[in-house]
Amino acid sequence: MSRSPGRVLLPLRMFLGFTFAYAGISKLLDPAYLDPSSPAGVRQQMLAVADTSPIGFLVTLSAEHATLTGLAIALGEALVGVAVLAGLFTRAAATGGLVLALSFFLTVSWTAEPYYLGADIFVAFAWTPLTIAGDGGVLSLQEFLRRRFRSPDTDTGRRVLLLGGSAATVLAATGTAIALAGRGQKAGTAIVPAAGLAVGAALKFTAPGGTPAYLLHPAEDTFLAFSAACSHQGCPVEHTGDGFRCPCHGGTYDQEGRVTGGPPPAPLARIPVQVIDGLVTTAQSG
């Protein structure tokens, strides 16, 4: 019994389920994700990889409907994650996870060299055991419902399908509502007094979410902030005085985060900032 497929695959199932649920909710919480003008938004990310992707024509078409596509991706990840964690239609949910991971591989990770530096191909293959074996009835809400309503005079399959689908919908809707509520309640974070950063200077700080970032003061009334993660492989970039440089693969960016050389496929993600009561603050979302 301890070697049943459901038990053997339980750690993988929990990891993938949590990761996809977290990824989907994180996207919904990110104010830049659906912002069509943000370099960190889904539209700009799609446009940045369209030329190098083998399915570029589909990516370009999706970018024209970026809000709908972005919501479909985020909600799809959240739904897949919740369903897999709960053990609801696990094979179908795992198949959805495989399709999502494969789409990420064909777009975001396609230019990774060598290929094994891109995580999405491994995630896609990681889903295959669950698409084949499912959850095996281990920690499975669907199995619980099947046993609970098993009766000779009851259409068990139809009832399990109805109750399981309703439970999955409620769980996904609850998670989405919590994520959107959290997104609306986010407040800006003070970085530095505006007078404390000289014109032409740069300051490294920690952005909301714990990621490293840089604040620049290029002109008297202008402040710009960028994520320090290189858009190529996520290595932390360094400010060089006239821009940014990635020490890992030699990517370079100008003072506005635009790519000037090397392998980065997209600009540095911009972090919205504003001056409030003399403090440079990350822009509030809502």
Image (cartoon, helix red, strand yellow):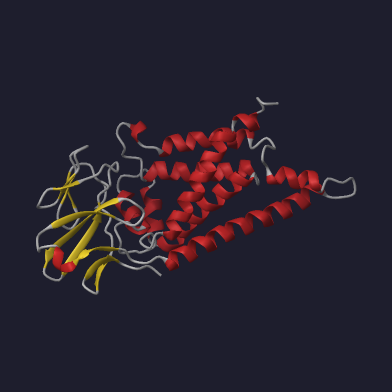
Q: In this view, does 219 lie above or below 214?
A: below
Residue at screen point 55% across, 58% down? 175
Quarter placement of the C terminus: bottom left
- Image coordinates of residue 274 in percent, x first then y, are 25, 69
Q: In this view, does 263 lie above or below 227?
A: above
Residue 52, quarter of picture: top left
Q: Is residue 14 above or below residue 25?
A: above
Q: Is residue 133 above or below residue 141?
A: above
Viewer-proximal residue among 206 and 138: 206
- Image coordinates of residue 244 in percent, x first then y, are 16, 49
- Image coordinates of residue 277 in percent, x first then y, are 24, 74
Residue at screen point 43% across, 60% down? 29
Count up the numbered dots: 0
Residue at screen point 44% across, 54% down? 26
Left or right, residue 225 beside residue 243: right
Left or right, residue 98 beside residue 219: right
- Image coordinates of residue 206 in percent, x first then y, are 28, 53
Quarter placement of the N terminus: top right
Left or right, residue 114 beside residue 6: left
